[in-house]
Image: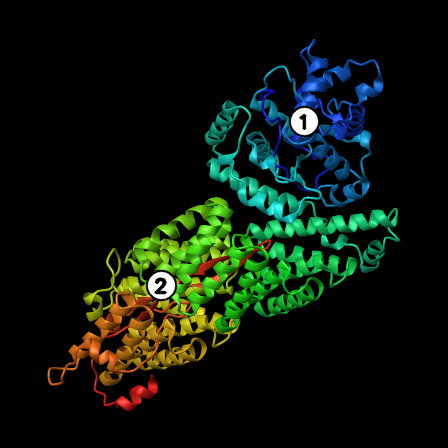
Amino acid sequence: MTPSTCGLAGNVLLGPCGTRRKGSASALVRPAGHVSQFAVSLSWLLRFAQQHRVRERGLTAGELVDRFVRPPTAAKQCRFAELLLSEPDPRQRAAVSQGRPFFFVSHTWVRPFRETLDMLEHHFQPEQQRLWRRRPDGQPLPALAGDEVFVWVDIFAINQHAADDLAVLWEAVYDAEETLMVLDRHGLVFSRIWCLYEAWQTSRAGPSKLRLLSYGAEIDSLEKIFINLDVRNAKASVEADRVRILEDIRRDPTAGGIKGMTHRLKEALVRGAVAQVPPPEEDDDEAALRAAAAGTVGRSDGATAAAAAADLVTRLYTAAVLCHMYGQLPEAESLYRRALRQLEVSVGPAHTDTLTCVSNLAILLQVQGAYEEAKVLHRRALAGRGRVLGTDHPNTLSCVNNLANLLYDQGLYDEAEPLHRRALYGRERVLGASHPDTLASLNNLANVLHSLGRYDEAQRLQRRALYGREVVLGPDHPDTLASVNNLANALYDQGLYSDAMPLHRRALESRERVLGDEHPETLGSVDNLANVLQSLGQYKTAEPLQRRALAGRERVLGPDHPDTLASLGNLAVLLQSLAAGGGGGGGIGDATFLGSAPTATSGGYLAEAEALHRRALSGRERVLGPDHPHTLASVSGLAELMQSTGRYDQARTLHRRAMEGMARVLGSEHPNTLAAASGLAGALFCLGRCEEAELLYRRALVGMERVLGATHPDTRAVEEALERVRRCKGPGQQRQRLRGAATSAGQVTIGAVPGAAAGVSAGAGGGGLGLGLGFGVRSMLGKHTMRVQVRVRVRVAGSPVVRAGDETIKQAKRLS
């Protein structure tokens, strides 16, 4: 490191250590004069700053070096700490650690040094040390006095007249008790390559050696810093330093490359924030909290107690938000609940800070599928903010948006739409058309319209949201990637699979880089890409992706989460496609429709698919209820499985349940209802009830032509199925032109159901049509809502197998 760099600064987050551990790096004995022995006491540092009026002058670390460090050390070309050791005054010599325990300070040289001073002084206050200074077994340690705290600050510990290599940095980090990363208000520490390199080295030195000093930092700023952290974009004052550090990272097999290092740093941030939170059993009791809030009683005085209570809430809330953003949902829930309890007692249940915590806890529960508790909290937050802030306040509008999102997840699309319109119009009026919250509402309204089957309108809104987010937030912001994903789903449901493919790939690759391989939204993109590949007939390529999505969701979200249940159904659909002979590239053609004898491999696929469908259906009935659109999708999926294995009566019963339920919940014009009716037509055809099947197919064709268009793949597939039915009726029956027959058949709606999968017919019941629809899963990063569209595949089957049957047209009309 050269003096022209930004200085030794690093990503800092650390767990509660505070003492030297037996056998640890801190126990190493370094030779006299080693760089790690030149930390200075906090008391001396504060006196130095006062003497040179560092705070009043607003000096940066670089300016401090130029004015007060380089000049006095120029003659000896030494470190500033070495000058102190040569002083006759024993107090000056005692200010250097000389092998005693110390804390490595990571900071930038371009920010005012008073920020570093203020955070160090605050961090080592006795009340603060009580929250973090502990033994390895978790027991608290006595607070250190100012002259007992030694901090390794590069401007005093490094020779500013000579270049030091990376090994010097590594050894200082390795010997330190902790690395204290000073997070400035703008997060520049995370944009400097030296800082990130120090953080990475700290994470290698120990799992709990990185601590973030972010006192007073706003949550929104912290979120932005976390999202934008990317080693590839880090800067250095000297380009050669940046190149050298990046090359060192690439050569290290433990780094996992630049991408791996970025995620290691984010993980360290999360772990460090959690480590700064005391264990739950040490939360203040209610009486102490009320006393602190009143400012009357505390450990030392009322003001100190109140400040300590507020600081504890900040720690809890910061850790909760970071865990939420990184996908560690159970940990985030526990932290939110602790923060909420503290706020309810200390500032009251109607305080705006309390309501913010209520809202974010509701969003987290919603992401985890706990809809009923989430709804109670959403309504509480909306009512409270409306009373305190007014109906048009941005925070109130956020609550409107969040409640609408919950209704959406519950399948109550008609109820969600007016709330999303209210939020959108209010945000446009109050915040402007380009505000991130307005763009979030635009995205969310588009998703509702999508789920209502209004694909053209949804696509237009999604394009507006995507363009706005790319301009305002940047191409790799999680919200932007949500819009990329959602636009891809809109194109998919319009049958434009090849157009959807590159967007889903972009979303997946960027989410892997920004959020990590196992973040719930990354797994949503894995699932979505697999569904597009399946629609393009690339079943073998899709299979490992579907299995990855399911395994990841089971691990991260749990076996009963709605997203996990969606993956069960989607994998089942894929297995049915493989069983139908789709082992390679090609789609579903006449060969599949005509059927073939099941092979041992196809039998294995079908057996696994049936088990997955039954598990998905059971889980959705239990978690979402029997009439949720996602549940009805699982009914359709199991019906197609029954049909593909020759169990036509069971298939008919399930298809009818799905069709009638979707018509009731979504309306008879919805694409999902149309798909379910087509599925019922296929089952009737397999039972030899050709007149009924033909009528339903005709009605489905009319609906799909009107809703999806004549060229949509699903419309064409129903048209082909209808043609096959007519061919199987025999030469004695008069044939009509398909279009005319369909037009005169009346109206019916057929559609895929959101969030589940129905199967591809195989064997005796082979052949069919695929129709997909996504449903939204949000996670809240602060106030910005992001959606993951989970793809659904529903197949509408027909079959040349004709059995005797004399069902009347009247019965067919009744069934439809």
- Left or right for 715, reference 49: left
Q: Is residue 236 above or below residue 322?
A: above
Q: Quadrant of the C terminus?
A: bottom left
> Looking at the rendering, which quadrant does residue 92 occupy?
top right
> SS class of the residue under badge 2?
helix
> SS class of the residue under badge 1?
helix
| Residue on which disc 2 sits | 493
Q: Which residue corresponds to the image point at 47% horizontal and 74% vertical from the top-left?
A: 628
Q: Is residue 423 above or below residue 625?
A: above
Q: Is residue 594 above or below residue 789?
A: below
Q: Is residue 762 visible?
A: no
Where's residue 311, x and y in %?
A: 75, 48
- Callout 2 crowding tier (Cα within 10 Å): few <14, some 14–19, many ≥20: many
- Callout 1 crowding tier (Cα within 10 Å): few <14, some 14–19, many ≥20: many
Q: Nearer the viewer, residue 294 or 142?
A: 294
| Residue on which disc 1 sits | 61
Q: Mark 2 vs mark 1: which is more N-terminal?
A: 1
Q: Nearer the viewer, residue 492 or 767?
A: 492
3D distance between C-alphas at marks 2 and 1: 56 Å
Q: Which residue corresponds to the image point at 60% horizontal and 36% vertical from the top-left?
A: 188
Q: Tags 2 and 1 in contact by the CB under 8 Å rule?
A: no
Residue that extends furthest to the left in the rendered view of this protein: 731
Q: Is residue 384 visible?
A: yes
Rendered image coloring scheme: rainbow
- Left or right for 802, reference 166: left
Where's residue 695, x and y in %?
A: 26, 82
| Amino acid type, mark 1 | Ala
